[in-house]
Image (spheres, rainbow, N blue to C red):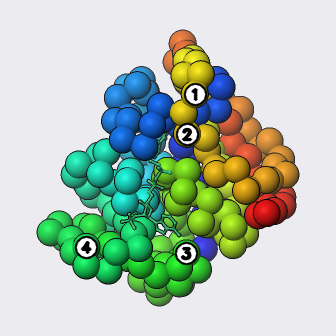
Amino acid sequence: MKVTVLMAMTLDGIIARSADHFPDWTAPNDKKFFAEHTRRAGVIIMGFRTFQTLKKPLPDRLNVVITRDSSRKSSWNNVVFTTEPPRQVLAWLESLGYTEVIVAGGSVTNSLFAAEGLIDRIIVTLSPKIFGTGISLFTPEISMDLALEAVERLGQNLVVRDYKVLQTVSR
Ligand SMILES: NC(=O)c1ccc[n+]([C@@H]2O[C@H](COP(=O)([O-])OP(=O)(O)OC[C@H]3O[C@@H](n4cnc5c(N)ncnc54)[C@H](OP(=O)(O)O)[C@@H]3O)[C@@H](O)[C@H]2O)c1
């Protein structure tokens, strides 16, 4: 199972101004890139807070929502809430036939997968914005060594960077 973190980021490495910041700051070609990639994988994993900011699931993909609260129940047929640890979630998705999953934030969820050394690849779409403060790609206990695999310019303003994860340390 290939595990890819796919995130939109500002030039100063921020993914949201706060935990309830609706992701309305990304450009249409950024949203299109995200939709194409996640539709190809067929499944997206996100934290409950991210799901709350979206308000409704992403269509045509299985939305797996990570929570600690087993009383949360899905009212959509393409949304699954799970309290299982990351490794078990991936094993379950593999048993369903998925070969790639997109972990799509937020910072807490990315870090739960990183802490277990489960992330193979990180793709960031770099927006021409500075937020100053906010939430990073990962929480502070995660550090990583990466190798830059590809850089692509999308339209006038967007840069896509694709990294392979070499090593992850969780302090
Ligand atoms: N720029 C981007 O591409 C991008 C992508 C995704 C998200 N975001 C932004 O990121 C922000 C949310 O990120 P976030 O890091 O605050 O939250 P998050 O990762 O989306 O979700 C956090 C939730 O994960 C659940 N969880 C499961 N296991 C946990 C554990 N061991 N420890 C803590 N929480 C656990 C908790 O849900 P329960 O409370 O239900 O237990 C917690 O509230 C939003 O503003 C969103 O818009 C940006």
Q: Is mark 2 within 8 Å of ligand 1?
A: yes
Other-residue count near label 4 (Cα within 10 Å), few / some / many at <14 / 14–19 / ≥20: some
Count of numbered badges drawn on the protein: 4
Taking 152 as reference, is 84 left or right?
Answer: left
Q: Which mark is residue 133?
A: 1
Residue in the image at 54% along x and 56% along y = 108
Q: Are marks 2 and 1 in contact (CB under 8 Å)?
A: no
Quadrant in the rendering for residue 148: top right
Q: Gap in Å between the C-alphas at discs 2 and 4?
A: 25 Å
Q: Which residue is mark 2?
A: 135
Q: Which residue is mark 3?
A: 86
Nearest to viewer (mark 4 / mark 1): 1
Q: Amino acid at mark 2?
A: Ile
Helix, strand or loop for disc 1: loop
Callout 3 crowding tier (Cα within 10 Å): few <14, some 14–19, many ≥20: some
115 relative position to 94: left or right: right
Q: Residue at 61% x, 44% y: name it.
A: 137
Dot 1 crowding, Cα within 10 Å, few <14, some 14–19, many 20+: few
- Asked if the residues shown at circle 3 and circle 4 are in contact, with their CB atoms under 8 angstroms apart, the answer is no
- Relative to residue 106, is residue 80 depicted above or below? below
Ligand 1 appears in which quadrant? bottom left
Badge 3 or badge 1: first in the primary sequence: 3
Q: Is 146 positioned to the left or the right of 120 in the image?
A: right
The N terminus is located in which quarter? bottom right
Residue beneath the point at 35% across and 29% down: 24
Q: Amino acid at mark 1?
A: Thr
Q: Nearer the viewer, mark 3 or mark 2?
A: 2
